[in-house]
Image: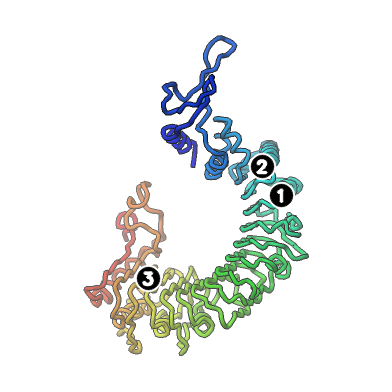
Amino acid sequence: MGLMELSLLMSIQRGRRRQRIQTNDGSLTSVSKRKSPPFQQDGNSDGGKRMKYPGPVLPEEIWCHIHSLMPMQAAAQAACVSRSFLDSWRCYPNLTFSRGIQCRNVNAHEKDEIVTNLTTKVDRSLVKHSGITKKLKLEFYNCNVKACDLDRWLQIGVTPAIEELTVQLPWDRKKYKFPWPLLSNGSGNSIRYLNLSNCAFRPTVRLGLRSLTKLCLCDVRITGDELACLLDSAFVLEQLILQRCSKIISLKIPSWLQKLSDLEVFECERLQAMEVEAQYISKINFAAVDELGQLSLGQSLQLKILEISYYGAVCYARAELPSSFPSLESLTIFSWSEMVSTPMVPSKFSYLKHLRVVFPARSLSPTYDHCSLISFFDASPSLETFFLQVVPMYAKHPSIFADPSDLRKMPEHRHDKLKNVKIVGFSSSKSLVELTCHILESTTSLEYLTLDTTDGHSPPRCSSVHNMGKCFPIDRDVILEAHKALLAIRTYIQGIVPSKVKFTVGKPCSQCHAV
């Protein structure tokens, strides 16, 4: 809510209120019957008249609530309008000091001046709102504020009233040590959301974060044992996000985190083992830097959504996951390297409905057989959607035009739940054409088929997304492969698509990417 919305609210309040005011003789009269305007005239030293607007009479808690819905800058500006706004500004609970203060592309003197002004403003605001701040954000992506200033601000801002705390520092400030004792001895009991980035967090004793529901640590220097001190009393934690925390070697998610439903672990480069005992987690997003280390999950874990990203992820998912996650419903796989084809194993994903497989650039061996993905179809009797994204210009798979022999016939298996199939980066690769033909021939429930010969982001016409006059340039080899893919679709696929299936083909821009 900004100043315009606030003015509108004031106008509505003036029209609706029936305020009773006291006259000079002590009687009461209704403002709705009074013909004088809602402005008061005061005399001044020049004998003239000065107009003063007192603002609508509302309870203080309503003014404070209105202010809490406004951005911090707008709330501060509104404090200049009337005494009511000024009083409510003094109880404004949400303080954000963000990257609006830019320190890039300025000389050293200007940078020092910017930081000095910033320090003064933060000091003044925090002191005025001490003890009433519920949400505090210190987001200094580009400004290297002093560690002593950060310590002082946190000392002032972290009080028993604080509910949300965010500290985002520049990437080169990882050595800053967050003053974790501020959260100990019950001082952190009110915090529901804690978000730290580019600092060190090294607790040595148990912290009392009994109200914590969401924890996000990005580029934070913290070990597994120190994280355990943080989680030791976080009984109501619902979401845990760890990103590039390079000091964590072993990660254990304890069983007492009964409320934890969402676990996300990204690129913790030294992580070798992860043990999950919390049994009510329904979603895990795991991305490893290299190969997956030891992953131990509770036998009673009722996982429904899983996203994994690492080397050899497709083979691992097919061979290991069905027995580990019998209740899995949605699976997303990012594989950075697949040297062998997906294994055909008997284990099944009994409840899997949505499968997404992404092969980034240079991730596939030229000998990888796309048809091996049929193993997922055979193992997933409830599968409804299948999404596949490849980057054909790097894999160099044999083209169907280089090997025009008959297409392979895969083992007969009917898929009576699959409704939506989309392949992005479709090429003339023979095994990719064979995979598509198999889906069409073995799926009786198919409703939508999309084959996109682009990267999925390029518009079909240069004017459909932006007004730059032409599309972004694409390598000629990529354009040639896209046109070969279109020929393969017309030759081998288009004729066998059932009439009831909505068939969509994504093409390069005909104006900018013609051969």
Residues at marks 3 and 2, CA–CA distance in whole angstroms: 54 Å
Residue annotated with mark 1: 154
Q: Is residue 315 visible?
A: no
Question: What's the residue at 55%, 79% (across, down)?
Answer: 301
Tag 3 residue: 423
Q: How many marks?
A: 3
Specify the quadrant of the image occupied by residue 348.
bottom left
> Please, what secondary structure does the residue beneath circle 3 have?
strand
Q: Estimate the x, y position of residue 466 in percent, counting from the top left.
A: 37, 49
Q: Are marks 1 and 3 in contact (CB under 8 Å)?
A: no
Q: Residue 494 location, x and y as percent?
A: 25, 73
Towards the viewer: 211 or 277: 211
State left or right for residue 155 relative to residue 261: right
Please rate how many residues cluster around mark 2, counting C-alpha atoms within 10 Å: few if below 14, some from 14 to 19, many from 20.
some
Residue 202 sits above or below residue 123 on the image: below
Q: Amino acid at mark 1?
A: Leu
Query: Residue 273's image quarter?
Result: bottom right
- Which amino acid type is marked by label 2? His
| Residue depicted at x 51% and y 80% | 317
Disc 1 crowd rating (10 Å Cα; few below 14, some 14-19, many 20+) is some
Q: CA distance from mark 1 to mark 2?
A: 13 Å
Q: Which mark is residue 129?
A: 2
Q: Is residue 408 visible?
A: yes
Q: Earlier in the sequence, mark 1 or mark 2?
A: 2
Mark 3 vs 2, N-terminal side: 2
Residue 500 figure quarter: bottom left
Eye-nearest disc, 3 or 2: 2
Mark toward the viewer: 1 or 2? 2
